[in-house]
Amino acid sequence: MAKKTSKVEARDSRETFVSIQTNLGEGENVEDMLKSLYELQKADSAIDNVVALRGELPEEVASLEKEISDMQEKLAENDESVTVMTEKIAKNKSDIVDCDTAIADFKKKMDAETNSLEFDAIKKEIENKELLKQIAQKNIDETRARIAEIKAENEDIKDRINVVNGDLDAKKKELEETVESTAKQEADLQKKRNSCSSKIDERILSAYERIRESKKNKLAVVKVYGQNACGGCFATIIPQTLIDIDSRKKLVVCENCGRIIVPDFDKPAPEAPETQE
Ligand SMILES: [Zn+2]
């Protein structure tokens, strides 16, 4: 039975640059591929920056909108409470009128009453009604005070809504402008990224995407940092590897972080030494 071919192994979704590197022959196309990877990484980093630029704004707009809607809800709740309390005051007022009517009636009866027991009973009824009147009046006073508090609170809320509305308008405008000014930039970068990625082998591309996703700085392809450090993890690169990078003929992978280390394609290539073949 035949063993699995390396091609099947190569499609393994966990494939890394290292496993690709071992399968990759030296050839003229390596430099072009490295250059495409380099440009792809540049385009992706630029897109990341564009997205980050407006990244916070949509959230900020949503948060201000939420704050306003919460305050409007509170205003409506307060208005509802005031309506209920106003009805309560009307009820207490009407109770007082009823008490006054009853007291007037009792007083008439008392004037006509000759029986001292009956007289005392009526007097007691009047006292009860007076007490009920006092309670109703106390309710009215307390409710009025509470209504005044709520109305003052509503005024504060309305002031705050005005302020937040101002902030919201400004943020919305900023977001609109940012989206507008970055839309073309982003579309151009997207075009550039697509053109680069179309030139890169699918296996390498999928490893690129996976490594990029796994790194905090979203870099899968890096340059040499300083004289001899990996631009991704800053681990020291040994001299032979530096030579390999400069040769532009090998896919060099950082042993420490797994990123591809490429020459700086924005700088002219160093003079190639005379080949002695
Ligand atoms: Zn590294």
Image (spheres, rainbow, N blue to C red):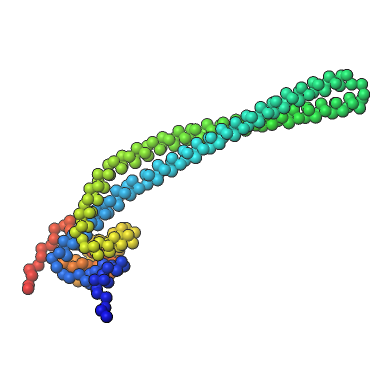
Q: Position of residue 111 (x, y in %)?
A: 87, 19
Q: Is residue 115 above or below residue 195?
A: above
- Tell me the residue at 46%/38% (across/down): 68
Q: Is residue 84 left or right of residue 154?
A: right
Q: Quadrant of the C terminus?
A: bottom left
Q: Quadrant of residue 264?
A: bottom left
Q: Quadrant of residue 183?
A: top left
**Viewer can see residue 254:** no
- Tell me the residue at 43%/40% (across/down): 65
Q: Is residue 128 left or right of residue 263?
A: right
Q: Is residue 84 left or right of residue 246?
A: right
Q: How many marks?
A: 0
The extreme front residue here reads 1
Q: Position of residue 238 (x, y in %)?
A: 23, 70
Q: Quadrant of the N terminus?
A: bottom left
Q: Position of residue 187 (x, y in %)?
A: 25, 47
- Tell me the residue at 24%/57% (across/down): 41
Q: Is residue 210 above or below residue 76?
A: below
Q: Is residue 129 above or below residue 271?
A: above
Q: Quadrant of residue 103?
A: top right
- Tell me the residue at 56%/32% (across/down): 79
Q: Position of residue 248 (x, y in %)?
A: 16, 65
**Viewer can see residue 104:** yes
Looking at the image, which is closer to me, 69 or 134? 69
Looking at the image, which is closer to me, 262 or 14? 14
The extreme right residue here reads 115
